[in-house]
Amino acid sequence: MKRATLVRALLALTVIALSVYAAVTSSPRLGLDLRGGTQIVLETRDSPTTEADREATDRTLEVLRRRVDALGVAEPNITRSGDNRIIVELPGLQDPREAADVLGRTAQLTFHPVLGAAAEGEEAEEEGERVLPDTSGQPLRLGPAELTGEGVEDAEAAIDQQTGGGWYVTVDLRGGGEEAWAELTGQAACSPPGDPRRRVAIVLDEEIISAPQVDPSVACERGITGGSTQITGGFSQEEAKELALLIDGGALPVPVEIIEQRTVGPTLGEEAIEASARAAVIGTALTALFIIAVYRLLGALATVALACYGLISYAALTALGATLTLPGLAGFVLAIGMAVDANVLVFERAREEYAARGGKNLFRALTEGFRNALSAIADSNVTTLLAAGLLFFFASGPVRGFGVTLSIGVLASMVSALLITRVLTEFAVSRDAVRRRPGLTGIAGVGRVREWINRREPDLMGRRRRWLAVSLAAVVLAGSGIAARGLDFGVEFTGGRLIEYSTASPVDPERARSALAEAGFPRAVVQSSGDGDLSVRTDELSNDEAAEVAETIGELGGSAEKIRDELIGPSLGDELRRGALIALGVALAAQMLYLAIRFRWTFSVGAVLAMVHDVLILVGIFAWLGKPVDGVFLAALLTVIGYSVNDSVVVFDRVRELWAARRRAPFAEVANAAVLQTVPRTVNTGMGALFILAALALLGGDTLTDFAVALLIGIVVGTWSSVFTATPLAVELEARSSAPPPRPARSRSSAAAGRFATGDGRRPGDSGAQV
């Protein structure tokens, strides 16, 4: 035992040392919703000649990278997502119009000979020709492209310092582009000055971005040689830089379409970080005080392990290079409450063991507590990891960040509880000073909740049909909210644009709605928050239309500062909605399969039906409250699923243990004993999580408030369902099943007999009788 303790201690020190090193040498990567900026999601499309596969998307990404670098944004991030999506993050860029204009011009860059001027409405006569207006609006008839952007090496805006001739654009060519340019300009030079045929048209996205005339000094048939040329034309600095940027971007192998755009102001990001930090500090402090009050010395040591959990989670987040988003911060804070659960499970089992041993051998009771709680801890954390994994694979954007941080938090909580807490607590209870004063440990007594249960000894499963009727009534009431009021799907699921403004003076939503209707936006949905901010949700808007909306709001509120801007294409909205439904469906199937393997099919069905009960009630309450169902709500919903199954797993793990020891006892009696024995854990774990969530709800800002409210509802409903829905359903199903009970478990401690532990292993006033 000493050798095992020493190994665990060395392993714990190694994990902490590595975490300190990672935390000191790495810095977290903040998402745009925390540091401010613009995110644009592009989707590649098939062209007539090229399929938008992974290779074409990678080549497109490199072209876009050159365009983005030319924007001058500090630390831009461009990554491929899947086979045909590209995510562009531009920190600090608050006006997405510039980036969207550059990235949105996505067709191949081509250079054409001008065949002459065209009449208004004239169409191309020959194959490969086209008619396009130049920058002044004059229609030009263009020949087939003789040079593409692949032949462009570099383009740069410059100013003529010597003659004061203004801004121009220098274009450097490469490879076959030099010969193609010489031939193209040589043909144009054969026409007299002023003739449209002496011009060369530069076309991007079916639009002539420039049509310069070949200088009179260029000889016919010879053209401009040397691999470099200049485009002049009285450009302003901005015009010259934009033209150089577009030419330098080169050709895209396939067209792309903007399907999502998000802009978050830096003020909102700073407020979100501060709010989450306050919630984390206050919630963790309250949780720590509660754990110390309940479990005394061991609770204090668990709090130290909880601090180590925070260090390990942070270090893992930075070492993996994961992006910390606003929902991710919520997941990080939430996992603190989950880390408490494993400690509570261990300490409650240690309490039972110590009482069952007649109040002797603290060290042995604690080690048995860790051993007996391991199964429930593993099962409950696996179910949570399933939900987090589904978030990562089926969700998108910031919600994926929640899945990542939640997964990291769950794994870190297991290390914290099963390794660090064990090392600290085993060291403490082996000290002579502690052994002489077992009351200091917090596991020498049964606790107030268990004392109350031992006095009352309620037969909950005897009234199981009554509890099932109450649960059914709650589902019907919540479901009526979905039927009567419907669900307010967010922009993520419906497509459209959501813009949030901070105005100098408060603006009445009805007045803003009327003003927007007069401005040509009759379908705009306007809402105000408690902080005086105003949000406008409409169908898909162009950037020019969004500017008009901002101008309208600014006229009403004195000024309007955009603090949030989300644009979701309709196709992406449909996809996200399908992904959410798939995530929920797969979550139910995965949880049922896992529970069926680990337990009995009756337990699995009971847990999953209780999970459905929790989901319907939570969604129904949000429907009655008129709160939005968006990606953050999806994160909360899948977390509630994890919580619901977590609670059910703890109860069923005890049912399995007791039933294996008492094979001849009626199942309803065994299930009732298991429920009563796990109530202290359920109450203490729920209280720990409630402190964290209450802090998030009160201090976390608008987005985190809805998230925390959803989880508060989910924890209350999930606690009810694990006791009064899942277990009664399992009892009813077992009554109709002829399958034999499980075989006795190997090497179970005396607590496995189901004894309600007081100080001497007997119930008060029961003359030593056992259940």
Image (tube, rainbow, N blue to C red):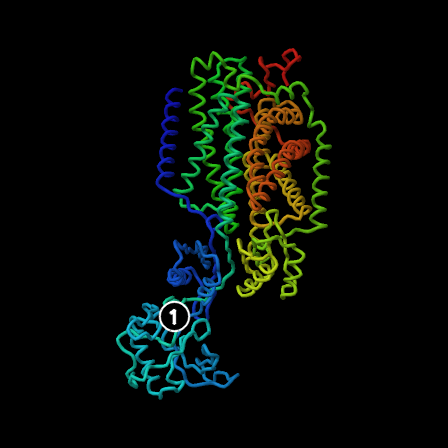
Q: Residues within 10 Å of mark 1 (few under 14, many from 20)?
A: many
Give the image location of residue 619, x and y in percent: 64, 45
Return the residue nearer the eye: 606 or 397: 397
Give the image location of residue 8, x and y in percent: 39, 26
Asked which quadrant contains residue 559, the reply is bottom right
Judge from the rendering whether residue 373 lies leftward or rightward of residue 526; answer left or right: left
Return the residue nearer the eye: 170 or 313: 170
Give the image location of residue 455, x and y in percent: 67, 18
Q: Secondary structure at mark 1?
A: helix
Asked which quadrant contains residue 227, the reply is bottom left
Q: Residue at x 39, y 87 (%)?
A: 195
Q: Label 1, on which residue?
A: 240
Judge from the rendering whether residue 545 lies leftward or rightward of residue 176; answer left or right: right
Q: Residue at x 31, y 83 (%)?
A: 186
Give the image location of residue 762, x and y in percent: 61, 14
11 versus 755 height, above or below: below
Judge from the rendering whether residue 578 lies leftward or rightward of residue 254; answer left or right: right
Looking at the rendered image, the quarter that the N terminus falls into is top left
